[in-house]
Structures are given as C-alpha cells and as structure tokens.
Image: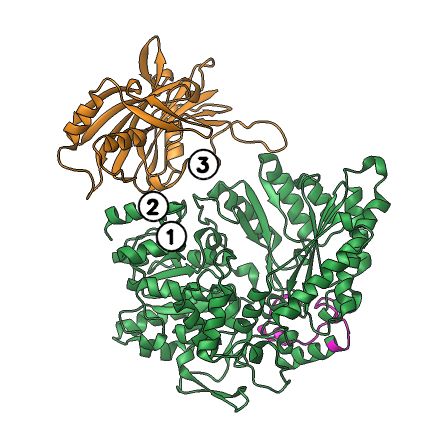
Amino acid sequence: MKVRIKFRKTGMMKFIGHLDVMRFFQKVNRRSGIPIAYSGGFSPHQLLSFASPLGLGLTSEGEYLDMEVESFEGSAAMKDRLNACMAEGLEVVSCRLLPDNAKPAMAVLAAADYLVFPRKGHGFPGWEEALSSFLGKPSVMVVKKTKKSERETDIRPLVYDFQRREDGMFLKLACGSVENLKPELLLEAFYRSLGKEWEPFAFRIHRLELYARKDDELLPLDSFGEERP
Amino acid sequence: MELEKLEEILLGVQKPGRYIGGEPNSVVKDPDTVDIRFCMCFPDVYEIGMSHLGIQILYDLFNRREDTWCERVYSPWMDMDAAMRREGIPLYTLESRTPVKEMDFLGITIQYEMCYTNILQILELSGIPLKACERDEDCPIVIGGGPCSYNPEPMAEFFDLFYIGEGETQYDALLDLYKEVKKAGGGRHAFLERAAAIPGIYVPSFYDVEYNEDGTIRSMTPNNPHAPERVKRVLVSDMTTALYPEKPLVPFLKVTQDRVVLEIQRGCTRGCRFCQAGMVYRPLRERSLEDLKEYAKKLLESTGQDEISLSSLSSSDYSHLKELVTFLIEEFGEKDVNISLPSLRIDAFSLDVMSRVQDVKKSSLTFAPEAGSQRMRNVINKGLTEEDILSGAAEAFKGGWSKVKLYFMLGLPTETEEDIKGIAALANEVAKVYYDTVPKEDRQGRVQVNSSTSFFIPKPFTPFQWASMFTREEYLEKAHTVNDAMKAQLNHKSLKYNWHDADVSVLEGVLARGDRRVGAVILDAYKRGCLFDSWSECFDNEKWMEAFKARGVEIGFYNLRKRSLDEILPWDFIDAGVTKEFLKREWERAEKELVTPNCRVQCQGCGARKYGGGVCFEGQD
C-alpha cells in the first residue's frame, strides 16, 4: 500500500538539507513503529520517495513523500503517530492512501507555488512593481549552466502565474523532471535585468504547494490520495 | 539573539545544521524553573562531538535533575568562526541559543591533546577571559574533564577546575554545592574553595609549582587550606547500578558515529604498557547482560537508528560477549538493524559473528599487533603472538576475507632496527598465509595487507611515562625503514604501507607530558591562528614552532630528555588508582622484555583494588 505524506518544513529546519530530511524520516518511521515496507537485497532500505528536494534555506508547507507500507491504520492515526516523533519545524499535515496504480509523486510533478519576499535589510522599495513588470515581458532570456554546456533559454514560459500579495509575491513555476525553474534563478535574472548585483539569500523563499498535471489541469499532489478513517 | 542576523550567517556557511540544535531527544526546559544552567562542550566540530558517548551520558545525567538544564555547544568550524567574529555574534548554546557566557557552568571534555587550541576558541567566542584568573562573577565556572585531565597542567591556567574521573560520581555533589553557595551569597572563590574538598576536583589556582634549575619540578604545593595535597580520581565502582542514557540525541546531520552505542564495560585487564586508557580506567567493571539487552531495545526504539555498536576497551574480554552478540543478531538482525562490532580478538567466534553481520567480500579484518617483533611486543606487553595473528588470518582467509589491516607503532622504547623491519616481515607473513591457505581457483585476485604505523607518544600514568621520544627526522627515518623493508618483501605487491604525520606526533608529545609552562605556548600558538590542529587541512606546524620559540620553551626538554624515576612528574599530584610503584615495576619489566599476565590471570597489585569493585573482586562475593 502506498501512502502520500504531506509535510511542512519551517523555522530552523530550513538549514537541514534534503538528504538529512530523508534520513530523518527513516528514523521517524522506525521510532513511530509505522509498518514501513523494505526493499530486498543485502542491505534493505525503506521504500520512500520524495516529490522534490527542497533547497537548503527554503521553507515549505507543501512537501510530499510517498511511502510504501505493509498496512494502513487510517489517515488521522498515522498522522498522529508520525507527529509524535517529529522535530520542531517538521510536521506532517496529512497521510492519504494512494490508489494502487498511482504514479510516484516525483514522476508526475509539474509545478510548484512559492511565496517570495526580501529578507530584512535586503530588497528595495517598489520591488513588487518591478518584479511584476519583469514577469510581464513576453520572454526572459537567461544563461542556464549545465555540467556540459551553457545555453541561453527563455524561462518566461516556465512562469505559470504570478500575483502580488500582501506578504510578498506569489509565483507558480514549472517544477519536476521535464521542466523546472528554481525561484532563485528567476530572482537572480530579475536583479540582473535591473543592473543590480544579486545577493544569494536576499529573498526568503517559501514553497506553498506542489502540483501534478492531469488533463491539462494542475492538481495538488495530495488530491491524488484519499483520507481514510 | 537576533534570529534574522543568525539566519543570514547560517545561510552562508557549510553545513548550517551544525549550529541549530532541535535534534530529537534534545532537552528543552523553561529557564525560569531551573537553578543551574550547564553548557556541555566537545571542543571539535559537531559531527565529531555528537559521536561521543561521554557527552550523551553527562547530558542525560544533568538533565535528569529538575533544577538543572544542560545544553550543548561544539566548535564552530572555520567559516562559522569567521562569521561570528565578523558579525559580533557570541557563542551560543544549541538548545536555547543563549550566550554561553550566561551559563553557570561551561564543562569541556578534553579527549585529545590536539584540541587544546579549540578550547581557547570556545572561551574567546563566548567572551570569557582565556585565563581563569581574569574571570569575574559574570563568567561561568569552566570545568575540564576527560582523558587529558590526567595531565591537566598544560591547560591549567585556562580552567577554573578539573573533574578527574567518571562523571556519574561527584557531579551531583558539585551542583548541590553550587546552589548552596549561591544561595548563601557566596561567589566564585567561595565555591571553588569548597569544591576543592570534593573528591576528584582539582582547582589549579590553589596550587603553586616550583622548578629546579634544570627545569624539572621541585615541588607542587597547595596554597589554599581547602585544597588537598593529592587529588583522587573518582569512579563508579559498580557499573550494574550506573545510569545509562536511554534516549540519546539523534543528529540530523550524518555524524562520524551515526549509530546507537552500547557501553558494555569500563576498564581493561590487559595492561598494555603504552595504553593510558588501559591504566587510568582500571579496574575492569562490566555491565550486566540483562541490563545491556534492555538498553539495546530501548535505545533502538527511542532513536530509530538502524545501527548499534558495542563500546569498550578489549571487548573480547567481556564475560557475556557471546550471549550479548547472539542476542543482538537474533533480536535485531531481522529488523534490518546493522550490528557493528568493535575491535574483537580474531578467533573462530568473532569470525563467525562477523560473517553474519557484514559482507565478507567487502569488509576488511583488523589486527593490532602494535609492534613487528615478538621481542617488541613483549616489551609493550601486548599479549598477541605471531602465531595468534597468522592462525587468525588463516581462519579469516578460509572464511572468505581477503583484506587485512595491520596497526603498528613506531618509536617504542628499546626499539631496534630489527624490530622496525619486523613490521614489514609480519605483513609479508600474513600475505603468505593467504597464498598458502586459499587455493588458486578460490582467490579473488591478490590479498591486500594494509599496514599503518603511528608514532608512539608516551602518556601520563602508563609504565612508559618515563620514555624518551624522538625527533621528527628520526621518526621519518623509522617510517622510511619500514617502507623500504616492505618493498623488499617477497609479497610486496600485496602490501600497502602508510604512516602518520611526524610533526603532529612531536607536538602531541609535548602537550601530553607538558607542565604549566607549556600553557603559554598553547596560548601563543592560538593567537597566531592555530585551530583545529587535529585536522590535517588546518594544522600549521610552522606557527607552533614559532610559538615555542617566542615563549622560550624547548621541545627537547619534554620529548627527548631521559626522565629519572625519582623525578616529580607534572601529574604526580593525581591519584589515578594505579600507583607509581606499579608503573615503575612495569617499566622495569618492560626493559627486561618480561610479559605481565592480565588481571584475571594474576593480580599485579596495581592499586586499583582500593576502589572496591570490578574485576579485582570477581568470584569473591
């Protein structure tokens, strides 16, 4: 049986990298007594798969993890059992049973929502307007570096939506193995376009939700699973 | 502390997870409900410090007290050190991010000499004056403990007090006393005076040291009526009643020893003459099998770790080892828990166990003959014979192993060129056993025999505490002799050899047997930028040599001089259990190449019997 776990990563936990979060969950599963399934072989491992690694320094309220279990005691019970073993800043939001034929979160991932806003002492007055008009352009060319080459690509098509909000700028960006746009890359291009020097970590980046595409529609990853008593 | 500023700094350093706390099983208390704030420090980087069992034991011990909150701090790595100095952020505790300076106590465990400059870093980043005599009522009481406190003198001026011995015994008395003195309106001095009367407590400022013209110590005398002439080491006489942390901290980061640790016993019966731990942790005291089984279950449940390892000196001597290991394999092996075994004597039992818990083809077997010739092994009292090693290796090769590691020391007392070359000869013999034992068709290529040597460093409270060391050049020559001899062996293609850095060994030698005058060198080296000296990428020998020169301290006085048996040694004021008479006897037996049997075979009257427990009273209920 497969269960899709949605969790939050906030506060100081932004300083714990993806691999350490993975190891953390492996230990939580052991501590909590969840009947997690293991792979075979000489060194068996827990059958866990994360939707999308969250970069160091980012917070999120919409992280996903698929877990293969031997039995399922119900959504609420599993959530409580896990949360009793979590650490401050890591919290399970829901545990939903996936249909047997569900594809892994990682494979179907298509988009992510973010909220970005400058850290204290960073940014500049009117940054929201400037960012809105930057994103209003038909194309945004950036140089993407890969291990082998550098090539110029248009990242504008990877920005699916943006809105000014009271507490920052909301961004819906492509995310996943097919097309992917990191908010840091977008913000850096934005700073460059203004002739400003980009300071890494000038902005706080908070991930809100992850989506998969189904029939041309973006659906939150947790909508593929079902709350079960 | 301003969180915003800290967060920005953390975003710019490597592995910021080192500096945030919040690990499962860490303890958070309401500061308003406790009387004592204790900060426990391991003066090395987080991943090393979090792997240390002693800290976990003390953390648990202190936090069991309702009136005490024990928090932790580790050495900020170079990048964090620079950022904290640049931004004016004081060193803070991981649990509550309270400046260390605001604590009542700062307890520093001193596990190896090469961390001494890190201790000064901890003090400086905390804003605590480096020298104890410059501290005022606003500073925490700075306590040192751990193996290096058996010669605390080089670091004496930087500590308010040292706790000599095992933490389980006197910390309650010390903390109770602190509360009492504070309540009565007493200050640091009043507390230190009364603390000096507690067994195991050494307050360096209450002692004066005078020197002879030749630089040796003339006398060490108390200058305060509360300070005893000799400081007694304290220990737990019955390990079956000793507490054990059932909920150890679980780090987020991958630390050096990322597993649950089960301490099966303390002390050692073997009496290897170079080994400080084997002398100062006497007598051997075992934990009960039933307790250990219980602890193993609880530890794995409370941490979710997937590996458990046994910890002790000479684990093969634990009376119930077979039952314990069998239990662990049967109980947890099925649950995908790895069982990691410490250095066991290689015999049929250990090989059988190892083949059940590890992948034979990938793993390598480790032998620690320590010396290349039988003569030399007799001198150091390492009971392992060449026959033991070769028959052990033969068994292992039959079991499928084809990688062997051999550990040796160079620069041992009485060592000759023949002894040195014996290292290569022994490595060759091990390789030969492989080709003699394993038929050609079963071989997986060549056998790999990896030998490594460290340079022997005489340590206080060992029979070799009087031994002379060598110069850097002499050490390197010894290593080259081994290297050349390896190349001349018949099976040289199967042999690999590497040796440790000689500069670090020379320095460690001075710090290990130094006196109070060495403190000025440590401070000077730190001021010149020496830090993380145990990390080869940070160690800067030139700066250390400049510091010795600047302070007019001669390395030769500490390392090369021949000490006479009646000389007053800097650590003689400590009663560590083993008597100086016993150590002298053993030093003389070493010179005569005589082997001394272990405690279970025959009591040697070392002095540890007075503690009233352990192996000294085995079978005498």
Instruction: Identify which amino acid the numbered label 2 is placed on.
Output: Gly
- State which chain disc 2 sits on: B
Residue B551 coordinates in the image, percent (x, y): 44, 78
Q: Give me the C-alpha separation between circle 3 and circle 1.
A: 22 Å
Magenta stretch prevailing secondary structure:
loop
- In this view, the residue in front, B573 or A97, is B573
Query: Which residue in the structure is indicated by mark 1?
Result: B79
Q: Are marks 1 and 2 on the same chain?
A: yes
Q: Give me the C-alpha separation between circle 1 and circle 2.
A: 9 Å
Please tell me whether residue B250 is drawn above or below residue B165 in the rendered image: above
Assess whether mark 2 and mark 1 are in contact (beta carbons under 8 angstroms): yes
Instruction: Identify which amino acid the numbered label 3 is placed on.
Output: Leu
- State which chain disc 3 sits on: A
Q: Are marks 3 and 1 on the same chain?
A: no
Residue B141 coordinates in the image, percent (x, y): 35, 70
Q: Which mark is residue A19?
A: 3
Query: Which residue in the structure is indicated by mark 2?
Result: B12
- State the extent of the magenta-drawn residues as a range: B591-616
Left or right, residue B252 beside residue A124:
right
